[in-house]
Amino acid sequence: MTKLAGTKVLVAGAGVTGRSAAEALLAAGAEVVVTDSSPERLAALETLLEGVDLVPGLAEPPAGTSLVVTSPGWQPSSPLLAAATSAGIEVIGEVELAWRMAAELADPPVWLAVTGTNGKTTTVGMLESILHAAGADAVACGNVGLPVVDALLAGRRVLAVELSSFQLHWAPSVRPQAGVLLNLAEDHLDWHGGMDAYAQAKAQVLTGEVAIGWLEDDRVVDLLEAAPAKDKVGFTLDEPERGQLGVRDGWLVDRAFADDEALVEVAKIRPAGPPGIADALAATALARAYGVPSEAVREGLEAFEPAAHRAVLVTVDAADVKYVNDSKATNPHAAVASLRAFDSVVWIAGGLLKGASVDEMVRTEAHRLRGAVLIGADRAVIAEALAKHAPDVPVRVLDLAGDADPMLAVVREAQELAQSGDTVLLAPAAASMDMFSDYAHRGQAFTDAVRHLTGGR
């Protein structure tokens, strides 16, 4: 019998995490109500969740509700959640639910948590690969796709948990055995209401036994220093000091969990370049905090294959122009890292900036730009920054509303601007939902358009 047995719980949101939360609550003996603004999403659950009351569009919790479990994207100010808070009903997320359910187990799994503005999915994938190389019963879960409650109920022993700022906001009790904060840059400010609140949500991963942070980000350093963790570890692309992981003579080096041990050659890390190396250091630090030996770190990182739409070379055309899909660069911080991998770029950018500023990005990276093709809801914001900081760069601003295949027009414009040796780079610096279902849809549309226009080379 769990603490949830017999309680009435409202699940807000009928998406992937909502369904998993409802299933977990049913298994725990709770009385479950699910609500969503979409009757279609609710209807899809009718044959999947027996014994659940499905109610569309609730604006306040039903009488007798003792807990609300919300999908991560719901803002605290949404009418239903605000009504719950006003009524004194606790609101948590699916990650917090998993944490509380794990606490009731005699032998709960180990949590190794990853957050940051960029690099989360690559890092958690690297971590999972290292843990598998060490023989651990581990799985990547959380924001990477698999809900944490599903991983918990499956009995996995080590959880490599990717956590967004939304998930962390709704998970006040989570204290991972080790947690890493990769970086911090403006993102989701419209949701959190400002940079301070966003940063504090991210800092939640630093409240466990081992806190790990990127030493080349001043905001991360400040949060790492203030963290309550017993052990604090930094990672850097420079030669590491004692208590740090870093790079020396082309090798990843551990001086935090070993005296001074070379672990893997930098040349064997994918994706290549500074962001990939930083992610590998972060994954290594988490794995070493769990006690993984150096051999497994090397084997896991060498075996890791990056996910799609993350700095993927699509093709090189007959004019020696490269086409690179980095649709996952959904904010300016990620776009900067992507741009810095190339010397001469025709940049495809635009979408939903979510309140983030692009001026500093354009100012620092203007010298790399051969041209720019701008799309999406906030294309004018980026165009204004380019006019201010890169007035000599040719810019094409496209209004593609109603276009059945907008990426064909985008790639055609980019081809006209590109010269031999250039890179046509999709690194939008913005979210995709104004024109596409998600970043993967956007990246695939770019890939398909490139292959069509380059003859499938």
Image (cartoon, rainbow, N blue to C red):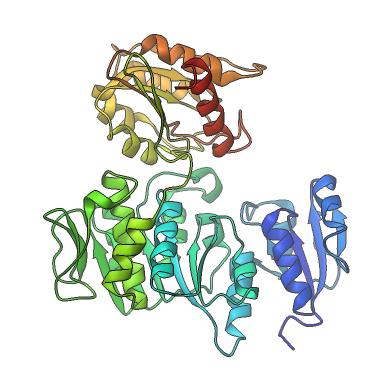
Residue 356 image position (x, y, % from top left): 44, 37
Q: Is residue 20 left or right of residue 191?
A: right
Q: Is residue 211 left or right of residue 91?
A: left
The image shows residue 4, relative to residue 54, as above or below, that is: below
Residue 407 quadrant:
top right
Residue drawn at x 40%, y 56% is 123
Residue 258 image position (x, y, % from top left): 20, 76
> How many numbered dots are placed on residues in this image?
0
Residue drawn at x 56%, y 28% is 445
The image shows residue 426, relative to residue 70, as above or below, that is: above
Residue 64 quadrant:
bottom right
Q: Residue furthest top?
A: 416
- The C terminus is located in which quarter? top left
Residue 416 image position (x, y, % from top left): 40, 9
Residue drawn at x 65%, y 52% is 74
Q: Is residue 361 or residue 52 the one in the foreground? A: 52
Q: Is residue 228 visible?
A: no
Q: Is residue 35 left or right of residue 203?
A: right
- The N terminus is located in which quarter? bottom right
Residue drawn at x 78%, y 82% is 5
Residue 90 quadrant:
bottom right
The image shows residue 103, relative to residue 187, as above or below, that is: below
Q: Residue furthest left?
A: 249
Q: Is residue 292 or residue 25 the one in the foreground? A: 292
Q: Is residue 430 visible?
A: yes
Residue 346 image position (x, y, % from top left): 36, 20
